[in-house]
Amino acid sequence: METQTGTWSAGQFIRSFFSALGQALKKLDEAPLEHKQELKEQLIGLLSTTDRNRATIRLLTKEDDELSRILDAHGWWILAKDINGPVKRELIRLGQSADTSAISGYLCSLFRENDAARLKERIDAWFTVPYLADRKQIVLDSLEAHKAGKSTLTVPALLPLVDGMMRKFQRQYLRPGHPNKAIQVKKFVDYFCRNQPKLFGKAFRAFMYKQMFATFDFNNGVCPSSINRHAILHGEIFDYATEANSLRVFLMLDTLSQFIQVTERRRKASAAKVKGKA
C-alpha cells in the first residue's frame, strides 16, 4: 500500500511538473518579443562560439528570419510590443499566401478591434515624452480621424512628428543636428540599431530606408513607397490615404516613443550608478 501511495505521489508530481512547465512555456510564447529577443540573441551569441551549434542556431533563427523577410516585403517592421508567438506564426502563415494585402489587413484588424483599444493604450504612454506631450491635441485629433477612416488627415498630420522626434533626439542624445535630413535620419537609425536587438534593428533600418525615408526622385516622380515621407509632405502623391499607412505612422511614433523612454531610463540609471560610486 505504501508502495502504491508512493508510486501515485511520484506520478502526481510528474504530472504537476509537466503541467506547470507547459503553462510556463505558454506564457513565454505569449510574451511579446520585446521581453525575450535580447536574451535569445545573447544565447545565439554564446552558441556561435563553436561550429557544432550551427543546426541549433538555424532552428532558433529560422522563424525570426522569415518574419523579418515577410514584414519587409509588405512594408512593415518588427512591432516588438505587439508580436508574440501566436501573432508571429499567423504573420508567417499569411506571408506565405498569395493575398498581398493579408499582412496589412491582419495588423490593421489587431489595432482596430475593441474600438482601437490597443492603439489607445500605446498612445496613452506617449505623453511621458515631452515632445509628444506638447503635441497631445494633434495626436488625439489624429486618433479620432484614424478611427473614422480619415487617413487623408492622419498621415500628413503625424509624419512631421516622426521628423521632429528624431531631430529632438539627435539634439538631446547625439551630436548637434545637421541641416541635411538624410544625415539626421542615418544618425538616428544607426543609434537605434546599435541599441536594439539585431532583429529589431535590421527590420527598422529596412523600413526607414526602403519605405518612409527612401530617396524620392522629384524629376521622374517615381515613388518608392506609398508611405514615403518626401513624396507625401511635398504634395507629389495622393494615394497614401489607407488605413495601413495611417497605422504605420502611428506605430512608427510608438516605436520612437518606446525607444526614447528606454534610452532616458538607461541614461538616468547610468548617471545614478556613477553618482553612487562618487
Image (cartoon, helix red, strand yellow):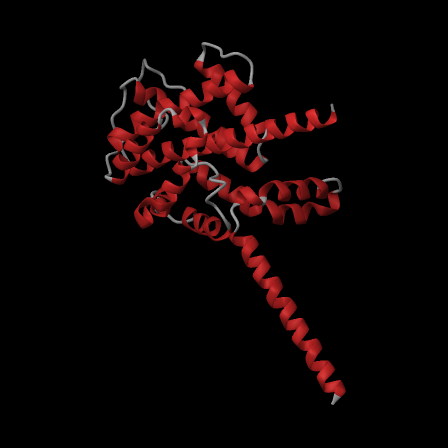
Which quadrant of the figure contains the N terminus?
A: bottom right
Q: Residue at x 27, y 23 (%)?
A: 237
In the displayed structure, would residue 73 be above or below residue 177? below
In the displayed structure, would residue 33 be above or below residue 129? below
Which quadrant of the figure contains the C terminus?
A: top right
88 vs 37, nearest the viewer = 37
In the displayed structure, would residue 5 be above or below residue 143? below
Provide residue 133's location: percent of width, then percent of height: 39, 27
Find residue 151 and report its image quarter.
top left
Provide residue 128's location: percent of width, then percent of height: 45, 31
Left/right placement of residue 110 relative to residue 195 reads: left
How many callouts does the rendering have? 0
Left/right placement of residue 267 relative to residue 215 reads: right
Find residue 6 and report its image quarter.
bottom right
Provide residue 146's location: percent of width, then percent of height: 28, 37
126 vs 161, nearest the viewer = 126
Find residue 3 and report its image quarter.
bottom right
235 vs 56, nearest the viewer = 235
Q: Residue at x 34, y 27 (%)?
A: 158
In the displayed structure, would residue 125 be above or below residue 134? below
Left/right placement of residue 247 relative to residue 176 reads: left
Provide residue 191's location: percent of width, then percent of height: 56, 24
- Whether residue 102 is visible: no
- Whether residue 72 is visible: yes
Q: Residue furthest bottom?
A: 1
Q: Residue at x 67, y 49 (%)?
A: 56
